[in-house]
Image (cartoon, rainbow, N blue to C red):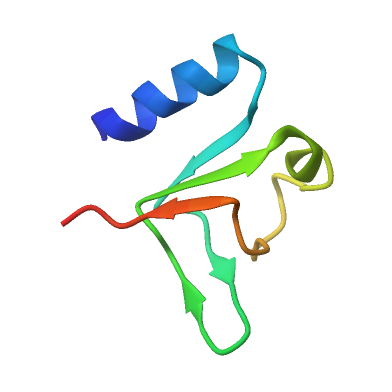
């Protein structure tokens, strides 16, 4: 997805945090979701393990229609 690639490039160049795609399972209070694009700020991303199966609520999430 081009949007994910653009956001990831911007976040990487400016050392902002982690951009994930639809393969990331986000666990919220009532349901789990797989948004098209998610973003975690640098401080939040530091606590994430790439091997974990569920991730906490992101700082930004987008579903592309």
* 41 relative to 44 in the view: left or right: left
Comparing 5 with 16, the one in front is 16
List x then y, in percent, for residue 1: 26, 35
**Would you place residue 14 above or below residue 38 in this image?**
above
Instruction: Give residue 3's quadrant in the image.
Output: top left
Say which residue appears at 65% left-offset and 61% top-offset. Answer: 55
The residue at the point 73 percent across, 41 percent down is 45
Question: Is 31 situated left or right of 14 in this image?
Answer: left
The C terminus, quarter of image:
bottom left
Q: Quadrant of residue 39?
A: top right
Residue at position x 56%, y 65% in the image: 26
Please provide percent x and percent y for residue 38. 49, 48
Above or below 17: residue 13:
above
Q: Position of residue 24 (x, y in %)?
A: 51, 55
Q: How many numbered marks have been drawn onto this rendered protein structure? A: 0
Relative to residue 56, is residue 51 depicted above or below? above
User: Which residue is the extreme one toward the left?
Assistant: 65
Q: Which residue appears farthest toward the top when viewing the image? A: 13
Q: Nearer the viewer, residue 38 or 51?
A: 38
Q: Position of residue 6 (x, y in %)?
A: 36, 22
Residue depicted at x 37% and y 34%: 4
């Amino acid at each position: 997805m081009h949007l994910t690639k653009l956001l990831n490039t911007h976040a990487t160049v400016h050392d902002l945090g982690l951009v994930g795609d639809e393969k990331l399972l986000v666990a919220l209070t009532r349901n789990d979701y797989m948004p098209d694009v998610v973003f975690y700020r640098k401080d939040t991303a530091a606590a994430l393990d790439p091997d974990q199966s569920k991730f906490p609520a992101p700082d930004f999430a987008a579903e592309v229609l």
